Amino acid sequence: MSHASDIDGLGLDSKQQRNRAVVGSSVGTVIEWYDFTLYGLASALVFAPLFFPGGGDLAGMLGAFATFAVGFGARPIGGLIFAHYGDRVGRKATLLVTLLMMGAATTIIGLLPTAETIGVWAPIALIFLRIFQGAGAGAEFAGAMTMASESSAVQNRAYIAGFPGAAVYLGMALATGTFALVSLLPSEQFLSWGWRIPFIASIVIVAFALYFRLKVKETAAFEAVEREGEIRRAPLVQAVRDHWRTLLAGMAIFVFALPWTYVVGTYALSYVTGTLSVNPTHALIGLIIAQVLTMPAAPLFGRLADRIGRKPVLIGAAIFGIAYAFPMFLLFQTENPVLVALALVIGLAVIQGSTIGVSAAMLAELFPTSMRWSGIAISREIPVAIVGGTAPLVATALVAASGGQPWLVAVYLIALSVVGLVGITFLPETLVSPARAAGSSAGSSSEAAATDASAEASARPTEPARR
């Protein structure tokens, strides 16, 4: 059952509030993905020799990528805990807490002594901070998706939801660019102190994000549910009980989309510079280009989804993933920096650009306000833990098992893309007709409130309010 009408009237905040909500949700996403991208880059290039020495190159790389995966194991735990409070206490307060958690963990990672100084306590401390970072990040993007979607009008919801999606790649590009600059240092200085600079510098981005997030008001959708006494005592439980089919189909979207992010954005860097012989700086430049081009791609694909529907765009993305997996690795194997960069651009800008904002709008429209953050968090963060953060580890193991060849990784990506395609086909189209969208945006605030009250009332027979 679609709940698009549940927010169609309630997205009509003032233009200033809508702009602040988009900026406030996006800047938190920047820090989330700045942090996570830094950790992924450091896992590929730094953490193995500094925190996991003595076991050989493969063992050290597997250890570094295992800590990368640990953070994703913490994501659903933090995501579900904070989603509970986001649906009960409010979007704004919860997002402030998640922002501070992520920023503190990343800054402290930049100050950690290595295994040479404190021995086994170095990887233990790294793992602890990674868990803390993951718990905060697990709620951040689901909350940003919720806030942006609730603050937008129906006729441009996927477009607006694309901005937090674009912010993902702004954070990635900032992290990759900063890391590329410090990697130009002599190797000894880079491994000694240069790698720490991007981590410590994250405190500046946190301060910037905190400034904007404090200016954002609570969304009108949440305030209306709170005013009407529709806050759920256990929104997570009710989302699972009443919307389990939607949750399974929603998870399938991210089972497909997320591994592409981490294979292209994290593992590919290790593969082309380690297994192959691409210059690390050239590989980083190619990745930065891909991330920069994904920024406009996300809202542009959102604009397309606002015109033709959410499902056609998502289905097209899954089909493209099935078709592109083998050609991507063929481009990598040329070891030509331009073709490697092209492979990275296509992998991110097309597949991620077409899924990240569109899926946000669609999921927001599939869950009622009282459990929207919970529904989005369950749909996204469980796949993140299972197939997202583990993707570089799985890819490393598959290439090692096949004697340095990447074809099993391509098969792995194809299989997950098929899962996504099946899940998307089971979801209803949530885009309303253009005439209805125009009527929703033209209504007054009082008419919007009446529309929402009617939508809530119609939902109650199938979704009884349990407190």
Image (cartoon, grey):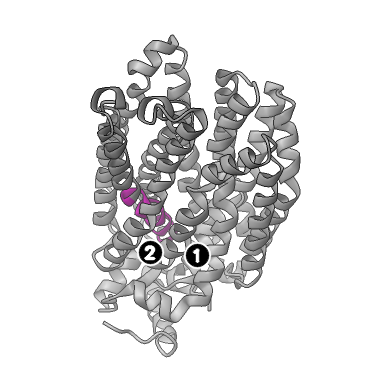
Residue 373: image tag:
2
Q: Is residue 61 magenta?
A: no
Amino acid identity at mark 1: Leu
**Residue farthest along the bottom direction in this orientation:** 461
Residue at the location (54% across, 39% down)? 295
Q: Is residue 146 magenta?
A: yes
Magenta stretch, residue numbers? 135-150
Residue 19: image tag:
none
The residue identified by callout 1 is 363
Report whether residue 408 is seen.
yes
- Classed neighbour count for the residue bearing mark 1: other residues with Cα under 10 Å, few (<14), some (14–19), many (≥20): many
The image shows residue 431, relative to residue 103, as above or below, that is below
Quadrant of the rendered structure where residue 130 is? Answer: top left
Distance between the alpha carbons at the discs numbered 2 and 1: 10 Å
Residue at the location (47% across, 24% down)? 177
Report whether residue 451 is seen.
no
**Residue farthest along the top direction in this orientation:** 186
Residue at the location (53% across, 79% down)? 1
Relative image position of residue 15 (x, y in whole percent): 39, 52
Quadrant of the rendered structure where residue 451 is? Answer: bottom left
Q: Closest to the observer: 74 or 28?
A: 74
Q: Closest to the observer: 446 or 109?
A: 109
